[in-house]
Amino acid sequence: MKYVYFFGAGKADGTGDMRDLLGGKGAGLAEMTRIGLPVPAGFTITTETCDYFLKHGRKYPKELRAEVSKHLARLEKLTGKKLGDAKDPLLVSVRSGSARSMPGMMETILNLGLNEKSVEGLAKATKNDRFAYDAYRRFVQMYSSVVIGLPKEELEEKLRAVKRSLGVKDDTQVTAAGWKQLVGEYKKYFKEKTGKDFPEDPEEQMWGAIGAVFESWMGEKAVTYRRVEKITGLLGTAVNVVQMVFGNTGDESGTGVCFTRDPSTGEKIFFGDFLLNAQGEDVVAGIRTPVPLKELSKSMPKVYKQLERVREKLEKHYRDMQDMEFTVENGTLYMLQTRTGKRSPSAAFQIAVDMANEKLITVEESLERIKSEDIERLFYPVLDPKLARNELSARKLTEGINAVPGAAVGKAVFTAADAEKWAERGERVILVRRETSPEDVGGMYVAQGILTATGGKTSHAAVVARGWGKCCIVGAEKLDIEAAAKTMKVNGQVVREGDWITLDGGDGSVYTGQIDLSRPEPPKAFETLLKWADKVRKLGVRTNADTPQDARVARQMGAQGIGLCRTEHMFFKDFEQPEKSIERQEAIQEMILADTQEARRKALAKLLPFQRRDFIGIFEAMNGLPVTIRLLDPPLHEFVPHDRAKQAELAKKIGISPEAVARRVEQLHESNPMLGHRGCRLSITFPEILEMQVRAVIEAAIDCQKRGVKVLPEIMHPLVLDRKELKILETATRRVADEIISESKVKLEYLVGTMIELPRAALMAGEIAEVAEFFSFGTNDLTQTTMGLSRDDAGRFLPEYVDQAKAAIFKDDPFQTLDTDGVGMLIEWAIAKGRKTRPKLKIGICGEHGGDSESVKFCHRVGMNYVSASPFRVPVARLAAAQAVVEEKKNKKKK
Ligand code: PEP
Ligand code: MG
């Protein structure tokens, strides 16, 4: 086994492809060396060594020492210098670098190799005492804190004391003697604390540093970072031992960081910062403010030109935007790092489109370059990136599950009614609830963002908010909400009604006060790239939309129809005529509470005009595109009031006694409402509901057809579990529809189909397809019922199931990313059986998974016709569908 890879003088043992083994930095240094760029020589100890070290009680593989010595000797020969030499010593940096970039999370030691003898050598060789002793004190300071773990603050204090004794303020004013004095202080302190002398032997120093870098892989910062960034499956960090070059030897020297394109806009300009006469660490620590890279073209025109050539070469070579670090030592340029640069979402689009146009990458590759988060983050406001991190953490109140990304600022209110009242006055509010219910939807709609103490990613609040692209945090379990007192308490702090709070739906953080937000403008490149995606993809992309307004937004986002219109949502709020909202809510409550068919018909007659008008609006918005309308599927308990006062109020309005309301609510009580009298079971027992809804759909369709609006209605029955059940519903549907159509003398075609959202329906899909003209997988319920996990309650324990540092049972939340192993098996079975019965069966998905990139790719692979996503996730689905085609092609080639 080879543990050490050398690079230098145009040759390297490793290559740029060996990121897993050499880490990003090591692979980049090897590759840059190979392609002839100026890189200081050195060697990389592999990530496998780190893995061994951590698994074997902090011991190295026995071959390692000899291998490192061999490569150190090679480095000394190549540079003509020796570590610890009294004349012109070799100095090295010892740096971390894993396969995934983890900026600042692991350790680095610079200027290694200095001791009492070699510091003199360095001073002589550079003819600069001050520089040599400055380098020495930096080394002793870093080594003491990083390798030995002495407190940074006390070391800093010693530095301040020396400055005080010299009567100077800045580091730059400290003389050689001053630094020498500080080195003495540090060493004394070292002895006091460790009982040992500071190591003089450079090899001992090097092994100490190597161990510290490996150890830093398990440091708290690094572990937390990997957890937050979901970085898993890596062996550890590599260690890079590289010849030091100095940017702080005078005005012919300096250091900088640059990008081959602008990382925030994506524009093709050379972008970066530079500091004259400084070391890289000064830039990172923010001790001095760097100047724009352009300045380098004035102060060192030759170096700048050379750097421009490096920029061109690296971008062509890596075929992606690079983020590079360089140092100039006495007029000579050295490249210290290159990696694929992180970029803002809008830059990601700009760069992908530009590079495809420049023919640097193919159109297919440009599609692969965009992540679904890039799209989501493009549309949602974010916390002002200029805000300092420490200020943010000081303001953090608590955190929950990040259900819908984006950020929101507003005054806390604790009831939906208050939210509406406040919003009417022109206030911006955040609605804070234990949980939300459909009654709250008006308040949710006017709120800037929504925060709940319970629930998961497919809870009511999350689904509704996602549909609007509204920032939403759910399951913030530490919140102690007292709706009556209009306060919430968390971690000893109290937030009262009207207090400002800020939500970051990106990571689920809740902050006190008003934090500035910025909303990124989607660039032109976004449209271009999505048009490319549309050409490539085979899956159709529809939307889940319940109102004409949502339908219009979704169409702008590129939806090719509606895959799910949840008709019960139409009774939450009247979006076109808000003053009629109450009337709507009461009509449906009256319908639910009715205990005779006659009473029910009376209530349904009130609902009919509302529904017809909604359908007309939706058909108009979707002119020429298919619209799937799902008949009523309300878990009934969600729609009726549970407290006495509200029941009495409702009783008065609908003209029955409060006792009768209370009795009906009692009767409707279900222990498991999600498995109760809902879905198509309602229409089986109360066919008049189906009749009213089908009438509303067909009358609206005829009205539109007559006016030249092209309508393609698809009537869908929810929660079907049996062929006969669907047959009864289908017969009733066609009877009502056909009668209205033939009376109207208008030509109208429509489909009747079913959702597949119960395991039994999936298993019996062959028979069900005898009746159904289409299937739409309702994967929210299908996940819930297949797994036996409540979609509304799983938020309480699922995080632990998903957390890689905890139980790690699932890779992702199955309510968010389809469980392709289990639920997926049922889907594949149902598609095969359904198509066997009816080869042209139209098949789609309308659960929340239809807007999740990985799940969309699965839908492509199993041969669905379309996916349906909430309006703001339509672009995500369009792109994922195209990426699925590209991936498929690649896999075929591999085979
Ligand atoms: C589903 O269950 O996946 C679905 C789309 O229906 P709902 O979320 O309305 O239950
Ligand atoms: Mg469902």
Image (cartoon, rainbow, N blue to C red):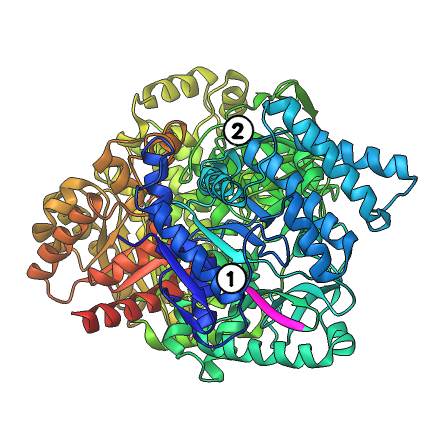
* Dot 2 alpha-carbon crowd within 10 angstroms: few under 14, some 14 to 19, many 20 or more: few
Residue lying at the far bottom in this picture: please name it: 358
Residue closer to the observer: 398 or 33? 33
Residue beneath label 2, please?
A: 653
Closer to the camera in the image, 270 or 28: 28
Q: Quadrant of residue 10?
A: bottom left
- Alpha-carbon distance for marks 1 and 2? 35 Å
Q: Nearer the viewer, mark 1 or mark 2?
A: 1
Q: Label 2's element? A: helix
Q: Quickly name the residue at label 1.
A: 553
Residue 26 picture location, percent across and down: 44, 59
On the picture, is 694 further left or further right than 454? Answer: left
Q: Where is 263 relative to 459, above or below? A: below
- Report whether 240 appears left or right of 171: left
Compared to residue 32, the image places residue 91 above or below, namely above
Q: Residue at x 61, y 74 (%)?
A: 267
Q: Which residues are magenta?
A: 332-338
Q: Residue placed at 58% from the left, 26% from the top?
A: 196
Whether residue 335 is in magenta: the answer is yes
Residue 390 vertical placement versus 874 (above, below) = above
What's the residue type where badge 1 is placed?
Answer: Val
In the rendered structure, the answer to whether residue 864 lies left or right of residue 415 reads left
Residue shown at 40% from the left, 27% from the top: 796
Element assignment for label 1 = helix
Image x and y of residue 486, in percent: 66, 22
Depicted 784 relative to depicted 247: above or below: above
Examine the structure image and report whether residue 155 is included in the region drawn in magenta. Answer: no
Q: Quadrant of residue 61?
A: top left
Look at label 2 and name its amino acid: Lys
